[in-house]
Image: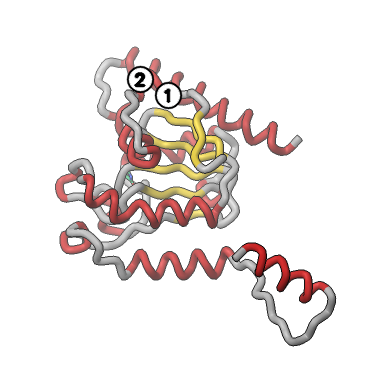
């Protein structure tokens, strides 16, 4: 197939008028992908959701933040990370020197699991191809997995976030840094624990920034 494509491109470059080699158009492909997400009926979650939450942001992002799945507020408005956890994520993004619209924010599953339960294996299996395609089309410089579920569902692993956070991993040759989910910080009660977890997330985000800076050199 690739060979055929190369031959067609060669003839096209030689000026052959009988050939039309379509340009790659990630924007159109992403729009089509969004349409597929908004029509998906592959698992039970589409029955209980209010809105699909496909994800949003820059179509050429430096960073793709990936969470677990929409919560109540996200389900209500069809947008990712706009509740309490989202407000904390916005602050992190801001501190990194980005605006929310400069990055892409999405989730492993695009419909809210009832009562915010963890997505089930068959729901993840049904939804994961959408995330894979988003990553392929967006081609971010770095992926940040927010929390254990996002990381392990994307990589098919069983890491503990306490041990793996901040380590440089990769998905399809794209650098990937796992860090705590913002909700993990919000659920902490003790002041010192909150500060410690925030410090660790910030350390992880500095690694993300260093990877991006290195790619720019
Ligand atoms: N938590 C997530 O994992 N994703 C969202 O979109 C909101 C909260």
Q: CA distance from mark 1 to mark 2?
A: 6 Å
Residue at 41% across, 22% down? 164
Left or right of 142 in this view: 193? left
Vertical comparison of 170 with 26: above or below: above
Q: Which mark is residue 162?
A: 2
Q: Is the residue marked by circle 2 packed among few (<14), some (14-19), or many (20+) residues within 10 Å?
A: few
Left or right of 76 in this view: 143? right
Where residue 136 sits: x, y (%)?
52, 53
Residue at 27% across, 51% down? 73
Nearest to the observer: residue 17 or residue 77: 17
Extreme residue in the right direction: 14
Reading the image, the residue beneath label 1 is 165
Nearest to the observer: residue 203 or residue 110: 110
Residue at 48% across, 34% down? 92
Left or right of 10 in this view: 189? left
Residue at 69% across, 32% down? 214
**Ligand 1: quadrant of the figure:** top left
Where residue 208 sits: x, y (%)?
56, 31
Which quadrant of the figure has residue 209?
Answer: top right
Q: Quadrant of the C terminus?
A: top right
Nearest to the observer: residue 13 or residue 91: 13
Element type at marker 1?
Answer: loop
Q: Is mark 1 within 8 Å of ligand 1?
A: no
Mark 1 and mark 2 residues within 8 Å of each other at the beta carbon: yes
């Amino acid at each position: 197939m690739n060979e055929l494509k190369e031959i067609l491109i060669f003839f096209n470059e030689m000026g052959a008028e009988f050939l039309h080699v379509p340009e790659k158009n990630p924007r159109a492909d992403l729009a089509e992908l969004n349409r597929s997400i908004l029509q998906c009926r592959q698992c039970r979650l589409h029955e209980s959701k209010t809105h699909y939450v496909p994800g949003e942001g820059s179509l050429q992002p430096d960073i793709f933040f990936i969470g677990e799945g929409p919560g109540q507020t996200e389900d209500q408005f069809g947008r990712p990370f706009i509740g309490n956890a989202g407000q904390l994520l916005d602050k992190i993004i801001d501190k990194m020197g980005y605006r929310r619209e400069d990055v892409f924010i999405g989730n492993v599953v695009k419909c809210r699991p009832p009562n915010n339960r963890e997505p089930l294996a068959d729901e993840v299996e049904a939804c994961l191809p959408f995330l894979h395609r988003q990553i392929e089309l967006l081609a971010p410089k770095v992926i940040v997995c927010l929390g254990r579920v996002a990381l392990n569902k994307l990589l098919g692993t069983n890491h503990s976030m306490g041990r793996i956070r901040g380590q440089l991993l990769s998905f399809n040759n794209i650098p990937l840094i796992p860090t705590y989910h913002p909700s993990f910080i919000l659920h902490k009660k003790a002041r010192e624990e909150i500060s410690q977890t925030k410090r660790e997330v910030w350390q992880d985000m500095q690694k993300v920034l260093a990877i991006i800076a290195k790619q720019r050199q």
